[in-house]
Image (spheres, rainbow, N blue to C red):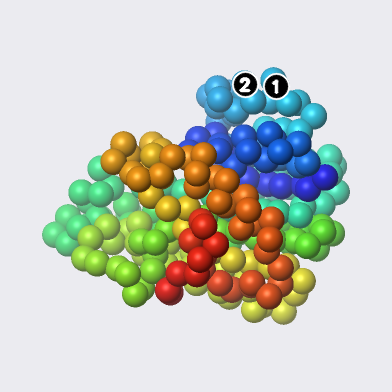
Amino acid sequence: MQRILITGANRGIGFELARQYVAAGDALVFAGCRTPERAEALQDLAGQAADRLVILQLDVNDAQSIAAATERIAASAGALDILVNNAGINPRGAHQSSHMGSLSADDVSEIITTNAVAALIVTQACRSLLNAGDNPRVVMISSGMGSMQRTRGDSYAYRMSKAAMNMAARVLAFDAAMAGITTVTVNPGWVRTDMGGADAVLEPEESGSGLLALIGGLTEADKGKFYQYDGSELPW
């Protein structure tokens, strides 16, 4: 049985991945979210599959929360095979404040910290668990908006945060301290979630099933790559 930690699992892509892994029946999913008591969909899912889903209080910007979550995983499972760094923000209103002429240092820093720095720190905290896992993999849920080659002149904070996440994944992939752990970054596509909005072109189920297939097939030969949810490679 695969042992999987998904951050930001209370909604959107994170929840869809948790749901599909639970439905597959061959995984123990640790679903991290900041406020479990508000995660009604996750609570319902746990009620249906308590033996395959563990809800963790996990605020990726809080060192004590990260430590408590990893301790609980160690006690329950002893290892991790897959870490999905999915937690991220792009607050409503940030779109407007992320354009030239209305930039705020605090807003930009908050988004970069949550989307990129936190993912790196969570990965560091999970390193010993991953070292004990089978074919251990770290998956950074990024965005096509983090591609240097595909960028355009808007959404500074979110684009910068995902570009920073991509760089973190590249460095992790070739860090000797992470030897044996495959790290990649993945674009889930433009998905109809709270963040993606109603105009998005993909349903969560389609993106999620593509991601599961991609993650399931990863080996060390794939480390340091940037993938689309369907398995095709993307330009940095």
In the picture, the quarter occupied by the N terminus is top right
Q: Residue at x 57, y 52 (%)?
A: 211
- In the rendered image, the vertical position of residue 57 relative to residue 87, given as above or below: above
Instruction: Identify the amino acid type marked 2.
Output: Asp
Callout 2 environment at 10 Å: few (<14), some (14 to 19), or many (20+)?
A: few
In the picture, the quarter occupied by the C terminus is bottom left
Tell me if residue 71 can be seen.
Answer: no
Q: Residue at x 38, y 49 (%)?
A: 190
Question: Going by the image, does 36 lie left or right of 46?
Answer: left
SS of the residue under disc 1 = helix
- In the rendered image, the vertical position of residue 118 relative to residue 51, given as above or below: below
Instruction: Identify the amino acid type marked 1.
Output: Gln
Residue 223, position as x, y percentages in the image:
64, 72
Looking at this view, is 42 or 227 the one in front? 227
Q: Residue at x 24, y 67 (%)?
A: 152
Residue 194, position as x, y percentages in the image:
38, 36
Q: Which mark is residue 48?
A: 1
- In the rendered image, the vertical position of residue 15 relative to residue 147, given as above or below: above
Q: Which residue is mark 2?
A: 44
What's the CA distance linking mark 2 and mark 1?
A: 7 Å
Identify the image quadrant of residue 99. Answer: bottom left
Question: Going by the image, does 149 lie left or right of 224?
Answer: left
Looking at this view, is 208 or 145 the one in front? 208
Q: Residue at x 58, y 61 (%)?
A: 120
